Amino acid sequence: MSARDISIGEAARQSGVKVPTIRFYEQIGLLPEPPRSKGNRRQYDERDLSRLAFIRHARELGFEVADIRELLTLTERPQSSCHEADSIAVRHLRETEERIAKLQSLRRELKRMVEECGHGKVCECRVIQVLADHNRCQGDAH
């Protein structure tokens, strides 16, 4: 393949990013709009595929679009300090740890509800009782 003859379908296949998502990334400016062929088809190159892989990986790690946009901007200045990238990652790590703590609390509460259920009638069901009255929960973190 030449420098600019990767179709959107082939870009999707190679990058693991679905066609509608590629179009969306173009719309929101994460991926520059590529040139078009005479038949008005998008034409991508290896650099676009690398950018798509970067975005996909960042999304898999849970980074928000705004953070990905900022990280992509940083990649355009390879000789600058990585302090900003580190700050974004540290903030994301903190948010992830907070979500994990909430999920662990949620897990404990759900486990307690299930274990305390006598598996009798709905009118005696501990799961239903706890869901109906938050005060019956042991924690507030969920």
Image (cartoon, rainbow, N blue to C red):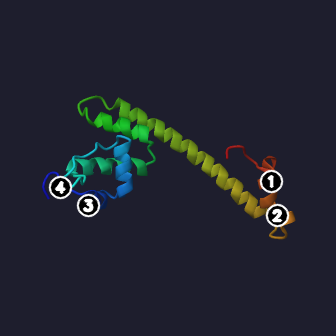
Residue at x 57%, y 45% (from the top left corner): 99
| Location of mark 4 (residue) | 5
Q: CA distance from mark 2 to mark 4?
A: 62 Å
- Hey, which residue is sitting farthest left in the picture? 2
| Location of mark 1 (residue) | 132
Residue 25 rendering spot, x and y as whole percentages: 36, 46
Contact flag, marks 3 and 4 (Cβ < 8 Å): no
Residue 10 - label:
3
Tell me the quadrant of the picture where the N terminus can be found: bottom left
Q: Amino acid at mark 4?
A: Asp
Which is more N-terminal, label 2 or label 3?
A: 3
| Location of mark 2 (residue) | 125
Q: Amino acid at mark 1?
A: Ala
Q: CA distance from mark 3 to mark 4?
A: 10 Å
Which is more N-terminal, label 4 or label 3?
A: 4
Residue 52 rendering spot, x and y as whole percentages: 31, 50
